[in-house]
Amino acid sequence: MKSKGTLIPIGGNENKGTRTNEKFHTEHIERGILSRVVAESGGVNSLIAVIPTASSIPAEVSQSYIDAFGKLGCRNVEVANLRKREDSEKMENIELVSKAHCVMFSGGNQSEIIKKIKDTSVHKILMDRYHNSSLVIAGTSAGAMCMSEEMITGGRHKEAFVKGAVGMTKGMGFLPNIVIDSHFIRRGRFGRLAEAVAKFPHLVGIGLAEDTGLVIKECNTVEIVGTGMVIIFDPSELEHNTEKYVKDGDLMSITNMKTHILAQGDMFNIEKHQVRILHVETPLEGHQSS
């Protein structure tokens, strides 16, 4: 099903226009991912609804986004403070997500989003508007991971590919054909995303580095944005997958799983499993044509 809306999952720790010790963070927020969120939403006059449900410090997180979007010229930023499941049935929250041009899910614990929003009136409105309008749904870290149909809830064993190391549950369902992991490079999440793909080999696994995200159109065309790497596990040509044959706690193996390492401006077509590299004419360093 082609969707009219846009999804922007982000790997976490995106540039909010404040100096940090991170080398990819500068004060130049106008060149960052949140600027792209604003542009996709219709510009600085668009209504942005921040949803801090995943966070344990919702007031602080909400204010950080109000400040960040404010630096980009946005003054129409409101908070949908969905702290309990019944909050997702309240008229003021229903009205906000019904009229917002963009909703922005914060980071934190993705299971809290599922617990308090999935299958409520707010969720149904978001799903309908995503499929049938130009709504932008953005989310960072937990807010990105919750977008998929099959959602990672946690994991362990950074050094080994072990059955049962990853926890999975149903997500918000905006993306039926991929599974997303965040903070992918910094937190060494190769094994848990690989197991998620082994469990669901019809899904493409996407690992997002920090300050890195995707702009997804029609639930199919993926554009990489931000300063870091995107790792794509494409299982479309798997030859061996031992997930079904070993016990929990045992080591697993996968063969012939394609892995793509993509950067800003590169594209990936989920349906066709095709990559388009931005700098296709960039020569390999030291390579000279004969």
Image: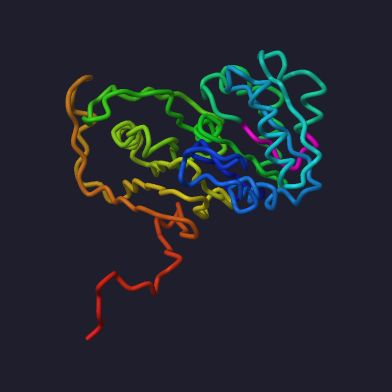
Residue at coordinates 66% horizontally, 13% vertically from top-left? 84
Magenta run includes residue 239? no
Q: Along the line of sight, which residue is nearer the eye, 107 or 115?
A: 107
Is residue 247 found left or right of 20 in the rendered image? left
Q: Along the line of sight, which residue is nearer the eye, 142 or 186?
A: 186
Is residue 198 found left or right of 146 in the rendered image? left
Q: Quadrant of residue 132?
A: top right
- The figure's colour scheme reads rainbow
Residue at coordinates 71% horizontally, 41% vertically from top-left? 69
Residue at coordinates 72% horizontally, 43% vertically from top-left? 71
The picture places residue 36, in percent across and down from the top left corner, at 63, 51
Is residue 169 found left or right of 159 in the rendered image? right
The picture places residue 74, in percent across and down from the top left corner, at 77, 43
The picture places residue 40, in percent across and down from the top left corner, at 68, 51
The residue most toward the bottom is 290
Question: Which quarter of the figure is the C terminus placed in?
Answer: bottom left
The picture places residue 201, in percent across and down from the top left corner, at 33, 39
Residue at coordinates 20% horizontally, 45% vertically from top-left? 255
Magenta run includes residue 103? yes
Query: With respect to residue 247, does 7 lie above or below?
Result: below
Query: With respect to residue 280, does 288 lie above or below?
Result: below
Q: Quadrant of residue 204?
A: top left
Q: Quadrant of residue 53?
A: top right
Is residue 145 found left or right of 7 in the rendered image? left
Count how many numbered circles sit on residues in the image: 0
Q: Which residue range is magenta in the image?
A: 98-105
Query: With respect to residue 273, does 19 lie above or below?
Result: above
